[in-house]
Image (tube, rainbow, N blue to C red):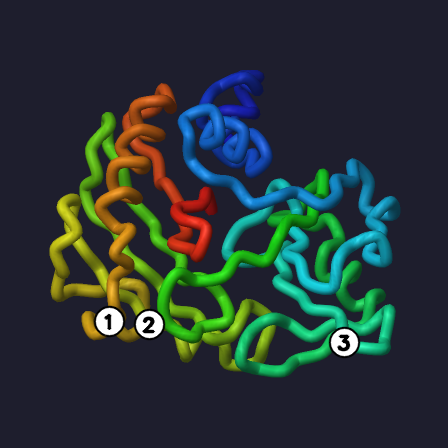
Amino acid sequence: YRIKQQGLDEHPRVAVADKLNNLALAASHGIGVAEVYGLWHEHDEIDLASLPDEFVIKANFSAGSRGVLPLRRVPGQADRYVVADTSGREMTGAEVLKALEPERRVRGPWYAEELLVPDAGDDPIPPDYKFYCFYGEVGVGFTRRTPQHFGTPGWQHQLRFHDFDGQGNTLAYHDRGATGDPTIPLSPLLPEMLEHARTLSRAVPLPFVRVDLYATTRGVQMG
């Protein structure tokens, strides 16, 4: 916000909030990206009917899992969707669009991409891997297990974290108000993800950047 107030709209700190820009950057460095099914510059242009039966729909500028919905169409009901987590929560098309409306932490454009599958385990949502990077090196990171998605009542109480250092070794602490769980298995793709995180940190002209990746059945994918 302070950077924008100074008129520095092209500052790289502003660019890292742009999800579509990040996908393009990752792809240019050989990192996998999910297939994009649709892109809409205005909220009232979003066309859910044009999408396949399962997808993730996102606002390009959003944070804290807001403006992101992993969905499957309910069989035989063209305008009803179930959130792709363990809750079984259903939403109408109107409710989906309401959750994507522009607000302080959600801004367009909006896009839909494929629903990725975890490389191991039976979780419906691929675990996040988040890497805190400094000048091309990974300081610390964690994977987050999220059996239920943002918006499901009580979802945050089911979060579990497995923290690790820059070499992928387990760390014993957690400080996000959720339960640390070193029994959460780390993906065999973790060494590859660590290297991708270092690459993207070097590619971004900032002293610090957080790199988000997924371990999926299609390999490492940009988060």
Q: Nearer the viewer, mark 3 or mark 2?
A: 3
Q: What residue is drawn where x is 50% and y is 81%?
A: 154
Q: Amino acid at mark 1?
A: Gly
Q: Which residue is mark 3?
A: 74
Q: Position of residue 59 (x, y in %)?
A: 66, 47
Query: Secondary structure under badge 3?
Result: loop
Quadrant for residue 192, please give it. top left
Out of 59 and 194, give the one closest to the viewer. Answer: 194
Secondary element at tag 2 = strand
Marks 2/1 in contact by CB < 8 Å: the verdict is yes
Q: How many marks?
A: 3
Q: Amino acid at mark 3?
A: Val
The crowding category of the residue bearing disc 1, from other C-alpha atoms within 10 Å (few below 14, some 14 to 19, many at least 20), is many
Binning the other alpha carbons within 10 Å of mark 2 as few (below 14), some (14 to 19) or many (20 upward) gives: many
Q: Amino acid at mark 2?
A: Arg
The residue that appears at 45% across and 32% down in the rendered structure is: 26
Name the spot of residue 218 as percent of width and height, x first: 45, 50
Residue 180: give its label.
1
Query: Circle 2 is placed at which residue position?
Result: 160
Percent of width and height locating residue 167 = 13, 46
Measured in 3D between alpha carbons, the distance from the residue under mark 2 to the one under mark 1, in whole angstroms, is 6 Å
Q: Is residue 11 left or right of residue 169?
A: right
Q: Residue furthest front?
A: 218
Real-space Cα separation, disc 1 to disc 3, in angstroms: 35 Å
Q: Residue at x 44, y 73 (%)?
A: 123
Q: Nearer the viewer, residue 158 or 77?
A: 77
- Number of residues whose C-alpha sits closer than 10 Å to that of mark 3, classed few (under 14), some (14–19) or many (20 or more): some
Is disc 3 in contact with disc 2, using a CB cutoff of under 8 Å? Answer: no
